[in-house]
Amino acid sequence: AAAAAAAVAATRAAVSHSAAVRAVVAARDGACNNAHDLGVFAAHRNDFRNVTEKCGRDCFGAKECSAKCMVEQLALTEACSVCWGDTIFCVAKQCFTECLGDSRSAACINCNKQNCMPALVACTGVSEDDLPPP
């Protein structure tokens, strides 16, 4: 019994360590810096903004709802969608006035780039040039 308990404990420790290693690698490489999400960015380069706007409106800027919406609308990975949910929340919070009337106005785009884009780039692990337009 003691040997079986030790084996279970060792297995749990290995699984936990493996999950921790994966989390560190994902954080280093970024949540969206993978073939699947980069492919979604490329395929939806021209309509990505429409989806982020829809998710932001439908979810009133809420992070979790917006992230789930991004998965449902674009099939982003869950990890990557969290970055976009955070960004939608950031724009709703930091750029509400600039974006209320026209989310494509220079004031809205500049606010997004100044206040929200640095965190999006850090979270995704993808350069601003390779992300879909804000």
Image (cartoon, rainbow, N blue to C red):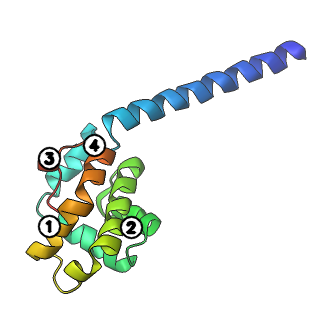
Identify whether 127 is placed above or below 50: above
Q: Earlier in the sequence, mark 2 or mark 3?
A: 2
Q: Taking 99 as reference, is 55 left or right?
A: right
Q: Which residue is mark 1?
A: 110
Q: Is residue 59 visible?
A: yes
Measured in 3D between alpha carbons, the distance from the residue under mark 2 to the one under mark 1, in whole angstroms, is 21 Å
Numbered badge on residue 66: 2
Which SS class for mark 4? Answer: helix
Which SS class for mark 1? Answer: helix
Q: Position of residue 90 (x, y in %)?
A: 33, 66
Q: Earlier in the sequence, mark 3 or mark 4?
A: 4
Q: Earlier in the sequence, mark 1 or mark 3?
A: 1
Measured in 3D between alpha carbons, the distance from the residue under mark 4 to the one under mark 1, in whole angstroms, is 28 Å
Pointer 1 with pointer 3, Cβ within 8 A: no
Q: Which residue is mark 3?
A: 130
Which SS class for mark 2? Answer: helix
Q: Taking 52 as reference, is 77 left or right?
A: right
Q: Residue at x 49, y 27 (%)?
A: 21
